[in-house]
Image (cartoon, grey):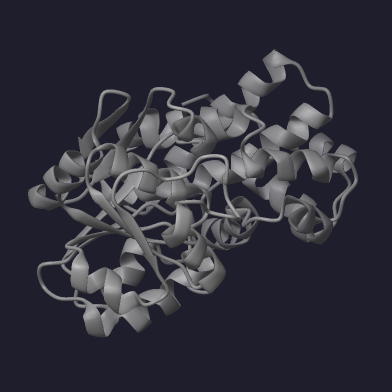
Amino acid sequence: MNSVGILGAGSWGWALAHLITKNKHKAVIWTNDKDVAESINKNGINPKRFYEFPLTGSYEATTELKDVFSKCELILIALPTKAIREVIKKSSKYIEGNHIIINTSKGIEITTGKRITEIIKEESCCKKIGVLSGPNLAKEILEGYPAAAVIASNIKEVQEKAYSILHSGFFRIYLSYDIIGVELGGALKNIYAIASGIADAMGFKINSIAFLLARSVSEMVRFGEKFGAKKETFFGLSGVGDLFATALSDLSRNKRFGKLIAQGKKPEEALKEIGETVEGYFTTKIAYELAQKMGIKMNILHTIYKILFLNYELPLALRELLASEIKEEF
């Protein structure tokens, strides 16, 4: 039995714990909430996330980072992006050469514009690094519906270890070497899920949503290629796959956030109502700043930025978007 560490006991961290234990491995879950840790250790129930789906099999929860890194070779990060640098910095004294750290969170650090795998490299000695991403709505995973994800790393051992731990008959793992593309795909799609939520709440029909998502993919590709990602990655699980799931499902907190904005809520009010991290809100700001700096044309991103951070009214923002210069599609 392999012990697999999970940093974070939120929705996705809880789904990962179920995937691991169902595959007959032990999940060692780190949380900074003592009450959550005690509840998990007592009866396998996470009182704050999906308490109706208790863990079975082998697991333990801890509030000590040392416990995770001393017991596990493979560690999965499932934390809000804004918390990751601090947690990795605190963990650095426990990280050794044999550790494998895989990012499963989907964001860009708002203060630096760094991807999470870049943060891991900066704050630790870890060399075996990867990223896991795909159309993975936590509740559907917990309910046992088929799903898939892609693991990207430039080290074969990292790919193989993640595959052996997570792959199953209902959760398929595909392999990639494009860390940048897989990581950016997972982060950027949250922006366009917010746009989809806005469009849905405004009563737009399928033609409009299809138009929106197709052009969203084009923007993701332009952004990714500028930072060294491969174009084809954005047409896979971590690009269009994740975008479709997040933009079309009301299980997506980013889409729900967009719907609340379209209903007249201020961003702060919508964030409070969602009650969990809405990565797309923060990613919109840093992605817009990076796009401006790098000269990347991203009309939809710019529109969402104006709505969320410049207090543009929706009708005005939409008129400006639809009036933007028309060029060749590709």
**What residue is rendered at 20% in x and 64% in y?**
72
Asked which quadrant contains residue 121, the reply is bottom left
Nearest the viewer among 169 and 115 is 169
Q: Is residue 239 above or below residue 102?
A: above
Q: Residue 80, can we see it?
A: no
- Where is 115 relative to 95, above or below? above
Percent across and percent down for residue 7 are 39, 63
Taking depth in this image into account, of 147 and 139 the one nearest to the observer is 139
Residue found 41% across the figure and 49% down from its top: 184
**Foreground residue among 257 and 12:** 12
Residue sitting at x 50%, y 71%: 83
222 on left or right of 308: left
**Residue pictured at 35% horizontal, 70% vertical:** 119
Please tell me whether residue 259 is drawn above or below residue 111 in the rendered image: above
The furthest residue to the front? 42
Residue 117 percent location from the top left of the image: 32, 62
Q: What percent of the width, then of the height, locates residue 267?
A: 79, 56
| Horizontal and vertical percent position of residue 288 | 60, 57
Q: Is residue 95 visible?
A: yes
Mark count: 0
**Compared to 198, does 152 lie above or below?**
below
225 on left or right of 275: left
* Along the viewing direction, whichever of 44 and 157 lies nearer the viewer: 44
